[in-house]
């Protein structure tokens, strides 16, 4: 029988050999896109680089602050009781003893945020060989929902941290206060032993009065609705109230700044000008006193610093 010739390989209709180079490039692009979409993990910062940091939720990073903008403790006048309580609480925390989260609330310009920064510096300076072990981390109000991520980053470090939020308050339909409540006391993990939260606010309950009144008027159970709103401030074990200062306290603040910076001015002129300045501002506070002293030093050619 005649031998059969081997058949030629069949050609697939409409098919071409895969372009492996093109496929590899496509896979790389897909992998890169998935990596960008994946949740970012906070990368540890060099905590030895500074004593203070700013937390940025976008990017999950801690930026060091080489020089903190703060006022010396001795220049904070008219808030002696609040100063002593906060410093004592901070010292206990720095030594590893039980301490409370603190809410500094009340009149604007009375040194709430200045006291937090000054207390951190004073306590840190007194730690001796462990100086620098207490870190101050500022978190912005709009980043409050990222607190769990920040605390997870700090939990296993050898340092102790004051997380500081300035001008903390909630308005309208903002519900991020619920996550703050859970982080402070109510969550499963709870607050790390090496973290404490200090916040300042013009509002005692961190909520606008109209928010609380609205809950009373519209809720099915007004009592429970109001409790839900105001219970956030209860998570702060330490409440420190700051109230408008008297005329004598205001003048003592001005006098303290003038003596500290050695500004040459007569007592009678200082008193008259300072009171006139506060009258035009319609307010007496540490902030107004400092603003007057800056104006006075500028007119007399004295540098502050």
Image (cartoon, helix red, strand yellow):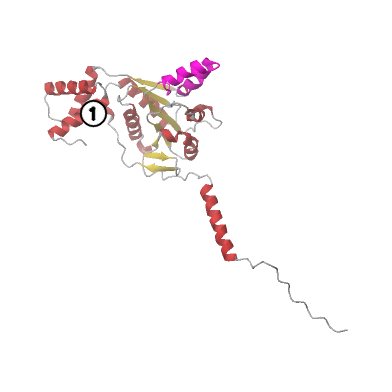
Where residue 229 appears, x then y in whole percent? Answer: 48, 22
Image check: 268 left or right of 289? left
Q: Can residue 260 be seen in this view?
A: no
* SS at circle 1: helix
Q: Is residue 86 magenta?
A: no
Image quadrant for the C terminus? Answer: top left
> Which of the two residues, 258 or 215, is positioned nearer the viewer here?
215
Where residue 240 appears, x then y in whole percent? Answer: 37, 21
Where residue 165 appears, x then y in whole percent? Answer: 40, 31
Q: In which quarter of the image is residue 21?
A: bottom right
Image check: 68 left or right of 220? left
**Is residue 144 positioned above or below 269 on the image?**
below
**Is residue 31 positioned above or below 138 on the image?**
below
Identify the residue shown where x is 53% and y is 52%.
33
> Which of the two residues, 231 or 192, is positioned nearer the viewer here?
231
Image quadrant for the N terminus? Answer: bottom right
Q: Is residue 231 magenta?
A: yes
Magenta residues, as a range?
204-233
Image check: 124 left or right of 150? left
Give the farthest residue toward the bottom.
2
Q: Is residue 78 visible?
A: yes
Image check: 112 left or right of 142? left
* Disc 1 target residue: 290
- Mark 1 neighbour density, 10 Å: few (under 14) some (14–19) many (20 or more): some
């Amino acid at each position: 029988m005649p031998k059969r010739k081997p058949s030629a390989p069949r050609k697939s209709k409409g098919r071409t050999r895969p372009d492996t180079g093109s496929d590899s490039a496509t896979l790389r692009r897909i992998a890169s896109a998935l990596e960008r979409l994946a949740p970012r993990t906070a990368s540890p910062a060099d905590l030895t680089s500074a004593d203070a940091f700013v937390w940025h939720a976008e990017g999950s990073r801690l930026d060091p602050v080489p020089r903190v903008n703060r006022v010396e403790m001795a220049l904070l006048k008219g808030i002696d009781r609040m100063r002593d309580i906060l410093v004592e609480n901070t010292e206990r925390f720095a030594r590893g003893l039980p301490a409370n989260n603190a809410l500094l609330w009340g009149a604007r310009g009375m040194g709430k945020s200045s006291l937090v920064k000054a207390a951190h510096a004073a306590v840190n300076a007194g730690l001796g060989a462990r100086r620098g072990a207490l870190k101050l981390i500022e978190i912005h109000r709009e980043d409050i929902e990222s607190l769990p991520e920040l605390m997870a980053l700090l939990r296993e470090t050898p340092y102790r941290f004051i997380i500081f939020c300035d001008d903390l308050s909630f308005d309208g339909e903002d519900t991020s206060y619920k996550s703050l409540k859970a982080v402070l006391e109510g969550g499963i993990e709870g607050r790390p032993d090496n973290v404490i939260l200090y916040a300042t606010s013009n509002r005692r309950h961190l909520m606008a009065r109209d928010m609380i009144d609205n809950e009373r008027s519209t809720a099915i159970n007004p009592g429970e609705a109001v409790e839900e709103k105001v219970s956030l401030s209860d998570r702060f074990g330490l409440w420190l109230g700051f109230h408008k200062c008297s005329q004598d306290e205001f003048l003592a603040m001005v006098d303290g700044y003038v003596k500290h910076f050695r500004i040459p001015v007569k007592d009678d002129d200082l008193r008259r000008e300072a009171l006139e300045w506060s009258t035009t501002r319609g307010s007496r506070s540490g902030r107004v006193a400092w603003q007057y002293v800056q104006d006075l030093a500028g007119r007399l050619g004295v540098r502050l610093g």
